[in-house]
Image: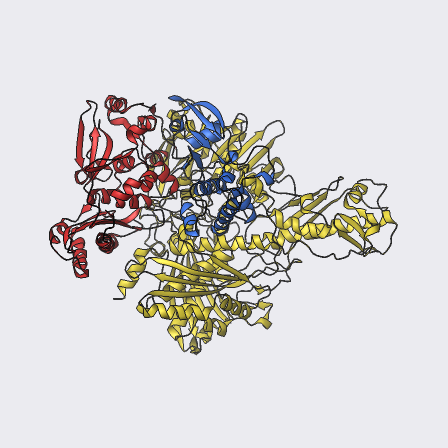
Chain colours: A blue, B yellow, C red
């Protein structure tokens, strides 16, 4: 069985693991690094539950081989808020999802939040249409998306009011 | 009631939107779903599945697979010793029971049916070895088309079921023939309610771990029904329920499909007992589409005896329901629910229904959000619009003519339900106001003058929920010695957010802060019984069980406080973490103090048992019947047939509200699922019974991109069926949205005078309606 | 549902990559962004024995957008996002950034590459029609470092099949520059759902002279056939014509004739695809024409 050594900077810290060559990035995160906040919903790149940031770009980690991420900087939902923090220290997007009931079962939520993060990094003041397009690759079966839009819009306003993009940065 | 009266305190939290207690864990990735659980020594299961829709299983040879590194065992049904078949109907002579082994041993009846379980040290090892299990099949003719299946000459799914009939029932209430004789016109309607998938974002999954020392099997299952599954799995395994503990972790959506027991649940449990190690299986999305139950799947026919003024004198319906390959308990009941809710919000005295449930070589159909009621609402609400168009009546008018009047509640329907309460005229009126219905119609007229195909749809829905008398729900409340409150709730949420509304009820009753309350659920070791989370029953039933338990706790704490304070006949208030005589806050005791006293047998009234734990099994007086009006405006692009939703208004009545934010969220999600069925979702099998929609690229569900804002409003008509006056809202949106979109599209196409007979409204189909009319 | 085992190679250079291709032969598969390949592998529909990963090749050797006197040059590993957002592409080949914008969703566009997409040659792939319409050329290199240029028209051979030889690696896509005025192009797409593949994609490129008379009008369709359908008659018939609404209707008739034996699936029947080919071809033509007539506008 072919193995490969993969070294990835995850949520700010370098980690490495020797894995099967066919290991997907999502499995590397979940099975090797125990970061189970990144979820598997389809393995075909359709649902977006496995969305993570890779070198500052949102990607679906079920469509990336772990070996392809060698050397990359990966941000997962676990890394979005500072460690050991309570609710009040959650990232503004996370807080907005709670405030506006932007989640129900929670399964799509980490991927959805990272897609929102990607959007606000690129476009701090998106229109409703731009938000809709930005999360088109993240399926949610519970919320009908309406409160997700509200949450992202609120997070945008809030971060703009505060210190702009810097507030988004973890 | 004792000398100490329980005072009614000012309600503070019930009725207000409160943030959900479970959300911080979900937004930070700390949710714990089935696939997040890893146990030491765990093996991974994978299933050998039939590539055929219908075939005899001649031989299974696992010898090559067993030689693969990492493979521990391959189990076929013959090796599952001492277990029973999967549940089917018992003692129901009118319904064909289908003996079904847990793993198909002689015959497979749908593509994807499991024939063997393979156990290995890793997911990869298990999956890789699957193709080395050699199964010899003798293909048989598959049964696919419902109409063809009913013919005597059709191939049969089961040799013992002629014409593929699972059951056939006829119900007749009132003078149906008389009604049709008196009618000015008889309108006939033929519709297809297509097979669709519940599609929770988290697929199914199970982990079983057998502890031989204690002879205890612990099962973690992504389920809506922990106790029910514990009992069912124990029964099929032939072990005492007492030897099985079932825990539901966080569940990533269910929508009905996780309310059933599946062959994999039993096989994995057996495997763990067999090898003495924990075993895990998590469904892939392909398996999910291939083997998790589907829903809806009915051919529907209605005949309405109509008077010229729009009054419906009589209704006949015929439903041909697609049972799929087997008779399970639920797929017998769901078409009957369609019959029972068939007359909707209308006062129709003469009602006849004929139901056929037909076997096909497809996945069994069971409960998808609404389970039987969306099908009923679809048939009657589409029919009302078709009648209105025939008679050139406004869809509003025909409904007003036929509504059950407000003063007729409780109203006994011809099918035998007693609708608890309703104000259909009032709710419709509010919906017309908030949607500015007249203005919508004016906009539509203007658009039509410009040649645009703009349509308005209207639906007035009702459903039955809060199941049900005799089949209630449970809850217990513990107040710890330290004064913390634990709600142990029956019914396990799969996204609904039970915890916060239940805590709100208790916070009000006991006068404590929400932060003092912990809500736990989903473990069979915590309650003697709890029933399934389904049928929009958690607020009315679990909520009531929690309320009644809280009242018992309060009663006991009142007595303890009064005893301590030396009061008799005093009314005690519970507010702000204190318990005190009404109007005399200075004299009271803290909640914690009273809790502490309760654990000391010498400090409580003589004869009282120490500790604070109260349990309630609540069985309601009746079902509940929430209702509402949905209005949608759509535009059809003539050249392409593309449907665009322009506006959506939902005005619902679910009685009293506990947490409006959560209620509205349920409506949003439900509406979008209903839109999904109307617009894009469909399970498609080819003529050989092969599933063509086996990935999310082919089975598509709505994304954020093509939707509009749902404008939600409400009216409030409480129910007497439970002490909270709440009716339930989980399924409402799904029930209303499907027919309202189709009604709107049919209205948009009114220049062509066509009837929309099927869904989804793919642009191809809509375009064919435009062209077909010439 | 899981991918099958394979040997993994991460070449650091183009020449190393093609040598590996040659060495491993038909069982080997190149992977770029992986947005088509990995899902197919996860479904068990593709099971390469060797994976040669292009993502660790020095970034600017395959991922770039450059200009010279005559051409716009796009490295094969340029992501859809980069194509969408590149100022040069927006300026000199607007139709390509317009196309990139319609592909799937943000995450797929962040990761998927133009080269990977065209080499996958899915008949419903978005780039196919516009690249044929703008007369793009594909440059491929083999282990002997020989560079071969293939016209877009010849590149797409059949469903999931290109003209690339087994040991060739696509390095660059070149698009001829056109004058910034009196040229217009457009890509319009009919999707069965948002973010989904095209039922029909229509690309149109139009050039007009200073009197508004057509020098060139070209329509190419994807999604309707196993390879892009280039509607030759439009190219021939319309030179020297005034492209009025009557001419566009005529173009529609030509498209209807040109679409033989359209694809059919659960999302759209063959007849509907043919009809939509006509509708979207006309839409693309109208839009391209309007853009060509915008005086001084720099649309291409």
Determine the residue located farthest toward the right in the rendered image: B566
Which x, y percent locates residue A64? 38, 32
Q: Is residue B396 visible?
A: yes
Nearer the observer, C68 or B603: C68
The quadrant the N terminus of chain C occupies is: top left
- Residue A39 at what x, y percent from top left? 47, 37
Quarter of the rendering containing residue B520:
top right
Residue B305 lies in what quarter of the image? bottom left
Q: Within the image, what quadrant is residue A123 found in?
A: top left
Q: Residue drawn at (73%, 50%), measured in percent from left and top?
A: B510
**Which is nearer the eye, C201 or B618?**
C201
Q: Image point 87% across, 54% down: which residue?
A: B568
- Number of numbered labels in the structure image: 0
C56 lies left or right of C281 = right
Using residue C286 as the reference point, say whether residue A108 is left or right of it. Answer: right
Vertical position of residue B341 compared to residue A94: above or below: below
Q: Relative to C97, say whether C54 is above or below.
A: above
Q: Nearer the viewer, residue C289 or B40?
A: C289
- Extreme-front residue of the structure: C296
Task: Give percent across and percent down for residue B595.
Answer: 78, 43
**In this rendering, position of residue B719 left or right of residue B323:** right
The residue at 80%/45% (across/down) is: B594
Q: Evaluate whether residue B369 shows in this view.
A: no
Q: Position of residue B168 (x, y in %)?
A: 44, 58
């Amino acid at each position: 069985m072919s193995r490969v050594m993969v070294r990835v900077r995850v949520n700010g810290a370098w980690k490495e693991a020797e894995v099967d060559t066919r290991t997907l990035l999502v499995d590397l995160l979940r099975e090797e690094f125990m970061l189970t906040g990144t979820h598997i919903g389809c393995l075909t790149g359709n649902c977006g539950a496995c969305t993570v940031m890779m070198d500052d770009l949102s990607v679906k980690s079920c469509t990336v081989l772990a070996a392809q991420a060698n050397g990359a900087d990966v941000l997962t939902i676990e890394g979005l808020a500072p460690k050991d923090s309570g609710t009040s220290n959650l990232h503004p997007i996370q807080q907005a999802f709670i405030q506006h009931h932007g989640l129900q079962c929670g399964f799509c939520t980490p991927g959805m939040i990272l897609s929102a993060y990607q959007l606000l990094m690129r476009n701090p003041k998106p229109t409703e249409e731009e938000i809709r397009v930005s999360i088109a690759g993240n399926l949610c079966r519970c919320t009908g998306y309406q409160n997700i839009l509200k949450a992202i819009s609120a997070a945008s306003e809030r971060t703009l009011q505060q210190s702009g993009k810097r507030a988004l940065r973890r | 009631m004792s000398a100490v009266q329980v005072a009614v305190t000012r309600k503070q939290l019930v009725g207000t939107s409160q943030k959900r207690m479970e959300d911080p864990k979900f937004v930070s990735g700390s949710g714990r779903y089935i696939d997040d659980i890893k146990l030491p020594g765990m093996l991974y299961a994978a299933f050998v599945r039939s590539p055929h829709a219908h075939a005899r299983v001649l031989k299974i040879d696992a010898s090559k697979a067993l030689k693969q590194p990492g493979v521990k065992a391959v189990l076929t049904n013959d090796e599952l010793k001492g277990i029973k078949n999967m549940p089917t109907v018992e003692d129901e002579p009118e319904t064909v029971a289908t003996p079904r082994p847990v793993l198909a041993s002689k015959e497979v009846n749908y593509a994807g049916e499991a024939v063997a379980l393979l156990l290995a040290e890793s997911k990869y090892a298990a999956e890789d070895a699957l193709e080395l299990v050699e199964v010899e099949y003798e293909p048989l003719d598959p049964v696919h088309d419902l109409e063809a299946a009913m013919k005597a000459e059709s191939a049969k799914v089961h040799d013992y079921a002629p014409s593929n009939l699972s059951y056939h029932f006829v119900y007749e209430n009132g003078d149906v023939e008389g009604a049709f004789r008196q009618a000015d016109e008889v309108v006939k309607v033929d519709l297809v309610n297509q097979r669709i998938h519940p599609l929770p974002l988290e697929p199914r999954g199970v982990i079983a771990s057998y502890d031989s020392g204690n002879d205890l099997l612990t099962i973690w299952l992504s389920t809506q029904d922990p106790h029910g599954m514990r009992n069912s799995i124990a029964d099929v395994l032939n072990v005492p329920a007492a030897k099985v503990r079932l825990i539901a972790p966080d569940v990533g959506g269910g929508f009905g499909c996780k309310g059933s027991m599946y062959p994999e649940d039993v096989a994995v449990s057996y495997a763990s007992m067999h090898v003495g190690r924990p075993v895990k299986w998590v469904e892939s999305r392909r398996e999910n589409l291939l083997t998790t139950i589907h829903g809806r799947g009915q051919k529907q026919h209605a005949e309405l005896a109509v008077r010229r003024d729009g009054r419906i004198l009589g209704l006949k319906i015929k439903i041909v329901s697609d049972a799929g390959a087997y008779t399970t308990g639920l797929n017998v009941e769901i078409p009957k629910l369609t019959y029972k809710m068939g007359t909707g919000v209308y006062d129709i005295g003469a009602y006849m229904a004929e139901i056929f449930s037909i076997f096909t070589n497809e996945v069994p159909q069971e409960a998808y959000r609404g389970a039987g009621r969306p099908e009923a609402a679809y048939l009657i609400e589409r029919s009302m619009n078709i009648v209105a168009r025939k008679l050139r009546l406004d869809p509003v008018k025909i409904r007003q003519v036929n509504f059950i009047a407000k003063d007729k509640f409780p109203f006994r329907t011809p099918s035998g339900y007693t609708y608890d309460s309703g104000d259909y005229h009032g709710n419709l009126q509010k919906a017309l106001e908030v949607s500015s219905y007249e203005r919508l119609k004016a906009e539509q007229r203007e658009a039509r003058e410009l040649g645009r195909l703009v349509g308005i749809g209207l639906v007035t829905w009702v459903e039955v929920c809060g199941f049900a008398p005799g089949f209630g729900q449970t809850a217990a409340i513990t107040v710890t010695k330290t004064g913390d409150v634990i709600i142990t709730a029956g019914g396990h949420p799969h996204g609904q957010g039970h915890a916060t509304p239940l805590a709100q009820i208790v916070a009000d009753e006991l006068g404590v802060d929400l932060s003092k309350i912990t809500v736990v659920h989903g473990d069979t070791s915590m309650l003697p019984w709890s029933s399934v989370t389904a049928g929009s029953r958690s607020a009315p039933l679990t909520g009531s069980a929690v309320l009644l338990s809280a009242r018992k706790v309060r009663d006991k704490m009142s007595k303890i406080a009064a005893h301590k304070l030396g009061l008799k006949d005093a009314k005690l208030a519970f507010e702000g973490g204190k318990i005190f005589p009404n109007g005399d806050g200075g004299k009271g005791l803290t909640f914690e103090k009273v809790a502490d006293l309760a654990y000391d047998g010498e400090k409580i009234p003589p004869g009282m048992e120490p500790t604070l734990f109260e349990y309630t099994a609540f069985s309601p007086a009746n079902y509940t019947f929430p209702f509402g009006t949905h209005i949608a405006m759509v535009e059809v692009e003539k050249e392409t047939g593309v449907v665009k939703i322009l506006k959506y208004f939902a005005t619902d009545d679910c009685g009293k509200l506990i947490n409006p934010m959560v209620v509205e969220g349920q409506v949003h999600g439900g509406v979008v699922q209903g839109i999904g069925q109307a617009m894009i979702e469909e399970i498609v099998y080819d003529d050989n019974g092969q599933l063509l929609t086996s990935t999310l690229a082919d089975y598509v569900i709505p994304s954020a991109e093509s939707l509009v804002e749902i404008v939600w409003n409400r009216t409030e008509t409480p129910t007497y069926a439970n002490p909270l006056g709440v009716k339930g809202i989980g399924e409402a949106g799904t029930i209303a949205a499907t027919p309202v979109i189709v009604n709107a599209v049919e209205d948009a196409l009114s220049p062509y005078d066509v009837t929309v007979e099927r869904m989804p409204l793919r642009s191809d189909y809509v375009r064919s309606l435009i062209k077909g009319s010439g | 549902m899981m991918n099958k085992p394979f040997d993994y190679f991460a070449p650091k250079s183009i020449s190393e990559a093609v040598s590996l291709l040659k060495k491993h032969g038909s069982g080997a598969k190149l992977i770029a962004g992986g947005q088509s390949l990995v899902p197919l592998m996860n479904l068990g529909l593709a099971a390469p024995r060797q994976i040669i990963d292009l993502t660790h090749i020095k970034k600017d050797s395959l991922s770039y957008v450059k200009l010279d006197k005559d051409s716009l040059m796009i490295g094969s590993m340029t992501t859809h996002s980069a194509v969408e957002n590149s100022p040069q592409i927006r300026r000199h080949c607007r139709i390509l950034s317009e196309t990139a914008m319609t592909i799937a969703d943000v995450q797929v566009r962040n990761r998927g590459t133009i080269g990977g997409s065209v080499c996958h040659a899915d008949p419903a792939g978005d780039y196919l029609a516009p690249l044929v319409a703008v007369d793009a050329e594909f440059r491929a290199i083999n282990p002997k470092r020989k560079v071969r240029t293939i016209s877009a028209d010849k590149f797409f051979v059949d469903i999931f099949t290109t003209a690339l030889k087994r040991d060739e690696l696509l390095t660059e896509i070149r698009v001829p520059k056109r004058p910034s005025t009196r040229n217009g192009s457009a890509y319009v797409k009919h999707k069965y759902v948002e973010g989904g593949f095209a039922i029909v994609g229509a690309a149109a490129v139009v050039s007009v002279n200073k009197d508004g008379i057509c020098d060139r009008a070209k329509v190419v369709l994807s999604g309707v056939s196993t390879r892009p359908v280039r509607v030759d008659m439009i190219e021939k018939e319309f030179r020297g014509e005034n492209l009025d609404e009557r001419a566009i209707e005529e173009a529609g008739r030509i498209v209807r004739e040109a679409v033989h034996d359209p694809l059919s699936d659960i999302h759209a029947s063959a007849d509907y695809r043919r009809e939509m080919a006509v509708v979207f071809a006309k839409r693309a033509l109208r839009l391209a024409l309007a853009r060509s007539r915008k005086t001084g506008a720099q649309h291409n």
